[in-house]
């Protein structure tokens, strides 16, 4: 395993307010970043997020509000920053594609590609989807409707600049085949490979004529063009953490990215265009892994403004609390698959996993420490005690939880839901142990030693659980630690009072 961990999220378009889909990627990235900071140390993790501010979508949204695109972006970016604060997203850097550091980098990258002969000028005539900002081949859209959004395509003819993707196709396919974790989950890797096997990549048009769209980074070698928004945006992963030196070599403390976390909708841009752009630039180290997660749907339907079914994450946080929201998203659906979002499903998780299981374990243990030991945790080392079978199983589980169970699920499988299940196995074992052991009987029967061991084991369970849930639910972990982190407990209100 590498000694550093550089993780990124997509840069979100600022044309509309953030919704639960955007929050999902950032919560997942935040959880991994927090977890890896524990494993590798604070200074060895870099977590980058930001906003994508150029292109037609933004220009149009700004026009509608009679603002310049820059004024509009300056206003919208605050909503994203506000949401990340509410959700306790611990990013190390936030990049906006309109910042100088990024614009300068993109222009330099374009010059390098031009000098290397990777970019050429050509006349283009073809089908174009204006809302998606994508060109399509006739073979891809025989009905002249956009394969993505199903809107009417326009025929466009213009002079533009192109990157030849096809000449890079063979090595990219080899790279995907030889590096099983390059594209995850495996099904997505197969999907990209199949696409590459069946299609010859057409050239990527990396410019837009200014007369059609002026809101973009000006091309350094043509005053009539700006840069295609996707070409500009992808480069953020490198512009935020490094620079080209005078001889055009890229230097960075953090590159290559260890993980680009994205939604499945933007897999091709990341798994095909991005590695080719890097390779063409002479940046030989490719991202170690690109993980495409699934989509949140509402009643099995896509969220969209026109359907009026867009869920506002801030509302959910105010209603249920930030940790409940984070927990729900990460636990309810295996990462990589689509999920159905509903308040009923959140309430179910809340009453079950959080109130009944975790909340109850903490509350009943604190009550016992208060009742039997006047609030002082019995001083003992559970390693030195021989428990009955259930107790020994719990002891073992405590030992393995961090660096075996959770580590395997997060670092290898990127499976948040399974990692949480592993933590909940311990919580459930402990709750079951309370019911089996009936501590109130131990107290009545004067089994003081046994009672002491038993309660000490529960306290150890809670402490390790608090440590493990910290990356997922930072606020809850803090509350548990405040209540039971030291040897004199401070019992508070139940962590998750049931919602009826
Ligand atoms: N700006 C581009 C990305 C450029 S990255 C160099 C973009 N932005 S976006 O705002 O439209 O969406 C970005 C990401 O938001 C998706 O890839 C995905 O991570 C997340 N989601 C958007 N809607 C979603 C759902 N309904 N469900 C889950 N995540 C989705 O594309």
Image (cartoon, helix red, strand yellow):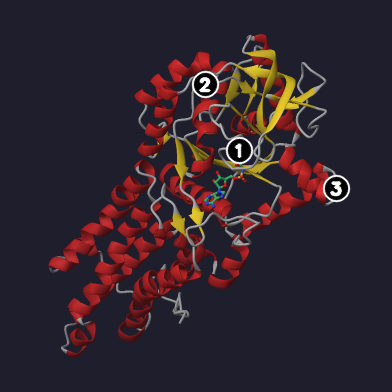
The residue wearing badge 3 is: 67
Question: Based on the displayed image, in which of its 4 quarters is residue 186 positioned?
Answer: top left
C-alpha distance separating marks 2 and 3:
38 Å
x and y percent of residue 10 in the render? 58, 41
SS for tag 3? loop
Looking at marks 2 and 1 on the same chain, the residue that comes earlier in the sequence is marked by 1
Residue shown at the point (69%, 26%) measured from the top left = 106
Q: Is residue 348 above or below residue 265?
A: below
Give the image location of residue 84, x and y in percent. 62, 55
The verdict on label 1 being within 8 Å of ligand 1 is no
Q: Nearer the viewer, residue 398 or 354?
A: 354
| Residue 483, horizontal then vertical, whole percent | 44, 73
**Disc 3 crowd, CA 10 A, few/some/many (<14, 14-19, 20+):** some
Residue beneath the point at 50% across and 36% down: 267
Q: CA distance from mark 2 to mark 1?
A: 20 Å
Foreground: disc 3 or disc 1: 1
Instruction: Give the crowd class for mark 1: few <14, some 14-19, many >=20 residues within 10 Å.
Output: some
Seen from this angle, which residue lies furthest right? 66
Question: Can see residue 262?
Answer: no
Q: Residues within 10 Å of mark 2 (few under 14, many from 20)?
A: some
Residue behind mark 2:
201
Q: Is residue 269 visible?
A: yes
Judging by the rendered image, the residue that carries numbered circle 1 is: 145
* Side of 222 where 453 appears, left or right: left
Q: From the viewer's perspective, is 386 left or right of 183? A: left
In front of the other: label 2 or label 3?
A: 2
Q: Earlier in the sequence, mark 2 or mark 3?
A: 3
In this rendering, position of residue 303 left or right of residue 285:
right
Residue 224 image-quadrant placement? top right
């Amino acid at each position: 395993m590498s000694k550093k961990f550089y993780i990124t999220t997509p840069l979100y378009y600022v044309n509309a307010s953030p919704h639960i889909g955007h929050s999902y990627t950032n919560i997942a990235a935040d959880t991994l970043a927090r977890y890896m900071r524990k494993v590798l140390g604070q200074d060895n993790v870099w977590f980058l997020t930001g906003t994508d501010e150029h292109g037609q979508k933004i220009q149009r949204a700004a026009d509608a509000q009679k603002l310049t695109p820059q004024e509009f972006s300056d206003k919208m970016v605050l909503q994203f920053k506000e949401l990340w604060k509410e959700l306790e997203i611990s990013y190390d850097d936030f990049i906006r594609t309109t910042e100088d550091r990024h614009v300068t980098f993109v222009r330099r990258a374009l010059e390098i590609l031009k000098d290397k002969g990777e970019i050429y000028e050509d006349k283009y005539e073809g089908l174009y989807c204006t809302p998606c900002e994508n060109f399509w081949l006739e073979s891809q859209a025989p009905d002249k409707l956009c394969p993505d959004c199903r809107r009417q395509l326009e025929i466009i003819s213009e002079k533009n600049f192109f990157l030849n993707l096809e000449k890079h196709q063979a090595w990219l396919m080899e790279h995907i085949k030889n590096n099983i974790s390059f594209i995850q989950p495996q099904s997505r890797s197969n999907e990209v490979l199949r696409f590459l096997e069946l299609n010859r990549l057409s050239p990527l048009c990396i410019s837009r004529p200014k007369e059609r769209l002026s809101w973009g980074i000006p091309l350094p070698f043509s005053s009539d063009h700006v840069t295609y928004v996707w070409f500009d945006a992808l480069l953020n992963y490198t512009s935020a953490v490094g620079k080209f030196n005078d001889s055009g070599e890229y230097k960075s403390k953090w590159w290559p990215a260890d993980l680009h976390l994205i939604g499945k909708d933007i897999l091709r841009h990341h798994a095909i265009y991005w590695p080719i752009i890097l390779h063409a630039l002479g940046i030989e180290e490719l991202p170690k892994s690109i993980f495409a997660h699934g989509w949140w749907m509402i009643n099995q339907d896509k969220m969209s403004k026109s359907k009026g079914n867009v869920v506002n994450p801030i509302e959910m946080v105010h209603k249920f609390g930030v940790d409940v929201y984070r927990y729900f998203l990460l636990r309810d659906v295996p990462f990589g698959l689509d999920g159905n979002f509903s308040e009923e499903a959140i309430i179910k998780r809340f009453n079950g996993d959080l109130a009944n299981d975790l909340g109850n374990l903490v509350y009943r243990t604190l009550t016992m420490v208060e009742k039997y030991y006047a609030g002082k945790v019995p001083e003992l080392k559970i390693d030195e005690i021989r428990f009955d079978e259930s107790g020994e199983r719990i002891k073992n589980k405590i030992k393995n939880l961090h660096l075996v169970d959770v580590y395997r699920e997060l670092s290898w499988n990127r499976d948040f839901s399974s990692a949480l299940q592993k933590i909940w196995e311990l919580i459930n074992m402990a709750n079951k142990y309370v019911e089996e052991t009936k501590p109130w009987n131990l107290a009545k029967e004067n089994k003081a030693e046994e009672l002491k061991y038993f309660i000490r084991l529960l306290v150890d369970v809670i402490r390790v659980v608090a440590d493990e849930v910290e990356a997922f639910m930072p606020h809850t972990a803090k509350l548990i630690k405040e209540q039971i982190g030291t040897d004199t407990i401070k019992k508070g209100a139940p962590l998750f009072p049931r919602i009826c």
